[in-house]
Image (cartoon, rainbow, N blue to C red):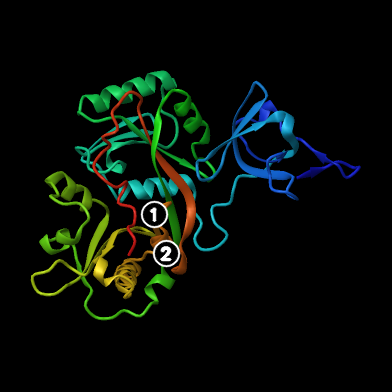
Amino acid sequence: MEFSAGGRLEVRVTTADVGKRVSVRQLDEDAPKGEKFTDTVGVLTSWDDGVLVIRRRTGERVRIAASSLVAGKVVPAARARRRGPAASYKELARVAARGWQPVERERLGEWELRAASGFTRRANSVLPVGDPGLPLDEALAYIRSWYAARGLPAYLQLATGAEGTHEPLCAELERRGWTREVTAELWMGSLAPVADHDLPGGVVLSRVADEAWLSRYQRRGVSEVALAVLGSGPSVWFATVPGPAGAPPAAIGRCVVDGRWAGFSAVEVDPSRRRQGLATAVMTALARQALDEGASAGWLQVETDNVGARTLYAAMGFGAHHAYHHYREPDVPGAGTGGPADESYRSP
């Protein structure tokens, strides 16, 4: 917080700072006894009629009466991470997109429209990295028309919590009635510590998702389109820990190697075999393969409520870089696009 020469707190945030990252302190009359103030850090997305709206890294929107402010200042953009590899939002967004490709895409300025017959929101949403080249009204109208022609609802995949993410656009879409359906996070970390774990025998790596691998995969009845998405990426590997004869595998996983990056997804373990180190074994085998191909950093996507997976991947050295959210166009029934979002990790 800012202090004046006399030692008093000052509010150094104004309406001109909309769109910037700020830190504010407000007087909270409802706070527990002895806790008079509440601090909020995030992007100031609006300041209208005496009310500030600040969007936190997680995407949560906080409304604050300007009259309750006791201190505030503009702060530098959040650092991506304090340890491990460094990366910008744009780099990670593009790497993640190359690791989970649609079967159809179209450019709209620097935005990419993606479709894959409804298989996962990531492959059936707009990735806005940069400028669409059109006024927002026209861009959204074109997007809705493009997805309607394919029998799909229009989604935008927006991020919060890092430099260059979409806090103002999130606020604008919410003002227009778009609905945020899913929130997850993209985590990253160094690859070598993952590969350094002990690796028991039995993990089989393959270039294709065979019938055994698919029998453990969380989505049943995988279509040709889904197989195309699963197999997309610069260098794709599928890991399998076989189960008993005639039974689905005990564990599976997927990895896409792309330059210095290795992206992990679809790590799933037989519920009866959890907490036996199988998820770690799958990750280790895939990480060693990625290191052999020259990668040094890893990324993965994990849902915010997946406590088991978050605990495991934090222990492996991964940490959150940014949150991302899928916004659905207004006036569309909430049918979604086929099950859990984004192939984020399930609990191992």
Query: In the rendered structure, which disc, 1 or 2, sits on the residue that comes first in sequence?
Result: 1
**Spot occupied by residue 215 in the image (x, y as percentages of width and height):** 14, 60
**Spot occupied by residue 107 in the image (x, y as percentages of width and height):** 32, 31
Query: Of residues 96 and 291, which is closer to you in this image?
Result: 96
Query: Of residues 113 and 317, which is closer to you in this image?
Result: 317
Distance CA(mark 1)–CA(mark 2): 9 Å
Task: State the residue at coordinates (12%, 46%).
Answer: 224
Query: Which quadrant would residue 53 be assigned to in this image?
Result: top right
- Number of marks present in the image shown: 2
Query: Disc 1 on helix, strand or loop?
Result: strand
Query: Disc 2 on helix, strand or loop?
Result: helix
The crowding category of the residue bearing disc 2, from other C-alpha atoms within 10 Å (few below 14, some 14 to 19, many at least 20), is many
Are the residues at dot 1 and dot 2 in contact (C-beta closer than 8 Å)? yes
**Spot occupied by residue 52 in the image (x, y as percentages of width and height):** 63, 30
The residue at which mark 1 appears reads as 302
The residue at which mark 2 appears reads as 313
**Spot occupied by residue 105 in the image (x, y as percentages of width and height):** 26, 35
Task: State the residue at coordinates (27%, 41%).
Answer: 123
